Amino acid sequence: MTAALRFDPIRLPEKCEQLRKEVRAFLAEEIAAGTFDPYAPNREDNDAPEFSRRVGAKGWLGMTWPKKYGGQERSFLERYVVTEEMRVANAPTRRFFVADRQSGPVLLKYAPEHIKMDILPRICRGEVCFAIGMSEPNSGSDLFAAKTRATKTDGGYLINGTKIWTSSAHIADYMIAIFRTSPPTKENRRHGLTQFLVKMKQPGIQVNPIGQITGQFEFNEVVFTDYFVPDDHVLGEVDGAWKQATSELAYERSGPERFLETYYVLTELVRAVGKNPDTRSAEGIGRLVAQVHTMRRMSVSVAGMLQAGKEPVVEASIVKDIGTVWEQQLPHRVRDLAAFVEETATNRETLEKQLDFAIKTAPKLTIQGGTTEVLRGIIARGLGLR
Amino acid sequence: MAESENIVAETAEKIFADLADAQTINHDKQGAWKAPLWQALTEAGLPLSWVPDDLGGSGASLAEGFSVLNVAGRHAIAVPLAETMLAGWLLTQGKIASPEGEMTVLPASPKDRVTLNADGSLSGRARGVPFAKDAKHFAVLATGKDGISIALVDAAKCRIESSTGLGGDHSDTVTLDKVQPITTKPAPKGFDQTTLMLMGGVVRSLQIAGALEAMLDISVRYSNERVAFEKKISKFQAVQHNLARLAGESAAALAAATSAADTIANAKTLANDAVFLEAAAAKIRCSEAAEKGSGIAHQVHGAIGFTIEHILHRYSLRALAWRDDFGSESYWAVELGKLVAERGADELWPLVASR
């Protein structure tokens, strides 16, 4: 076999089910207290700082990290349960999601000890928000075309240039960004970029919000003008950021958020259709449920392989490719079926509002965090085609 | 995969590699390869994998048998191995000893029924029965006034209207007109035709997943050999992305099928919503993958893959044919949709998350 893809039937361990109950109970309390409306994924502002602190107090942020940094040393499968329950409930996770999934693990691996001791416990307490500074006006999928410069100066670097499409930059306390410290070499065009920890809300950084087609202001343009970053904020090897990116991507690509982003419309369709669906509705729902079940089984399988110390890079890319394509199609398939929902369905208006929002959200799902085209390139490489 | 599953699957793999090479089979119009292959499989105890020693089988675990079926799918095996395994499994549910030789099960569709008459004979018609023409015995699930029974029937006593399915294998109509079975036993409590269809569906899902793995493999290999516009076609991004999609479909089918097989292998009872979700979802998703995946495999191969001389059709047409057995994807989608609607909107996520 040229390509031995593996998706072992991994099950979440028993202890996850107790945790799942705790998360559901917590979310039910938050909903009852009016923190968020589970039926309204389209709320204006998904930022909920107090909720973030309460999630942190439960020990559900940085769950897998060492205890000395505020973590719980629990498994990735336990973290998986927390993530999927929050996602399905439409909980407002924006403030902590990036830090918990991505930025914390990068700091754990590359930051000096005193920075880890300073920031990681605050992530675990739900106090800090992170953004990721990758894309630039002329460098999106082609990460290695980044031009924003970090020029060496006394005790650190001066940053000049612009990042764009930076989610949450307007509320973030920190950004982990890549900047150009050297020009690329002839042999390696990926050479010359360095990963930095950037403190936001400082002079020299201007954040300009960018309106999205959903009506939300989620991403931003971030302009750096002679912004100073101290030496100890370099993460990893100077000029060597390209070596650091790959292994973390498996975590980023295969989580529940990669197929559950528009899941709420399916729940609402089932509610609208009622107990006795006609054949067309039943078939439509059945196919969608078969798909979400399969996606979840694939995603859990990758989580299990990661927990076991494997590096299922191709499998993770496959999960994101077909998961995001599916979550993008889901609102359109639900719309097809919603056309036949009785006028008398009590949640008709909720379903219509949700569909409106989900259909507007859909185009971004196959772009953010690695486009479909980039993912298929990675899969093709894994198959031995390039 | 546990070590014992590996050993059984490796045994099967070796037999298929030695005696069922796709190129050789494809050129052998007389089917001379069939008898030696069946003999080797029988000697290895594979057709009766799921029958315990005291009922005449080799007593392998469900998990071991499922792993054999995935391998059989990768080789698009055109002898009734899966059918005989399934028949042996069904007979074992009724504590009926399995005879030697090829078997198949009926009904093979959720819509067909066989009736157990008051005089102990069986009546009914079952369409699309795989390999009925090749089988010496049938394992039959029958409905009588006292409930569900399982029977062993001599194939020679039934009327068989021969036909072939998409994949070129026998898919026949079997008519039972007051046929006296060799043995009849009551089915265990809770075991009904849905149970048989779900199990059959998982068997087919594993075979489809295997065939898709093979299609991915030969498509990747072909794209690395075939030159057009002065380069290998694997270097064209359009081709790469098609193959990446094929990998995705193959992966989805494999994940859905092995998850369902794992569920059945570890279930205390097959009559619950979790088993239903897993098995129905596997058949639905694998069938959808068969359509999308075989389409891409053919596209990558171009005209050569459309020829009878090329081996691609052995996998692509069988994967498409297997969709129809034991309930098509649209049938199971309706049934799964009804189950989900009956449980209600707020019980959907708990069901999905329970797996």
Image (cartoon, rainbow, N blue to C red):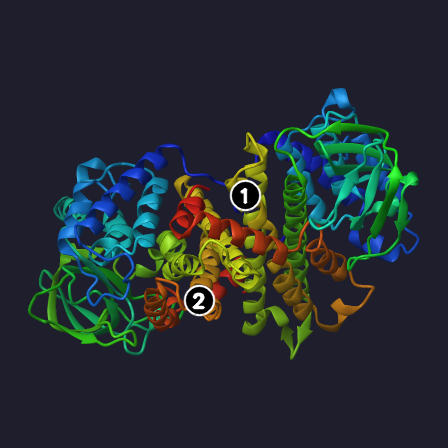
Q: Give the side of residue B9 with respect to residue B152, left or right.
A: left
Q: Residue at x 68, y 53 (%)?
A: B211
Residue A304 at x, y percent in the picture: 43, 42
Quarter in which the N terminus of chain B is drawn: top right
Q: Mark 1 belongs to which amino acid?
A: Ser
Q: Mark 2 belongs to which amino acid?
A: Glu
Q: Which mark is residue A342?
A: 2
Q: Give the side of residue A99 with respect to residue B74, left or right.
A: left
Q: Residues within 10 Å of mark 2 (few under 14, many from 20)?
A: few
**Is residue A350 placed above or below A28 in the rendered structure?**
below
Residue B115 at x, y percent in the picture: 78, 40
Chain ID at mark 2: A
Q: Which mark is residue B259?
A: 1
Q: Residue at x 37, y 51 (%)?
A: A251
**Is residue B73 placed above or below B295 in the rendered structure?**
above
Residue A189 at x, y percent in the picture: 37, 69
Tell me the quarter of the picture where residue A252 sits: bottom left
Task: Give the residue furthest to the left.
Answer: A203
Query: Total number of numbered labels?
Result: 2
Residue B72 versus residue B355: which sits nearer the camera?
Answer: B355
Q: Residues within 10 Å of mark 1 (few under 14, many from 20)?
A: many
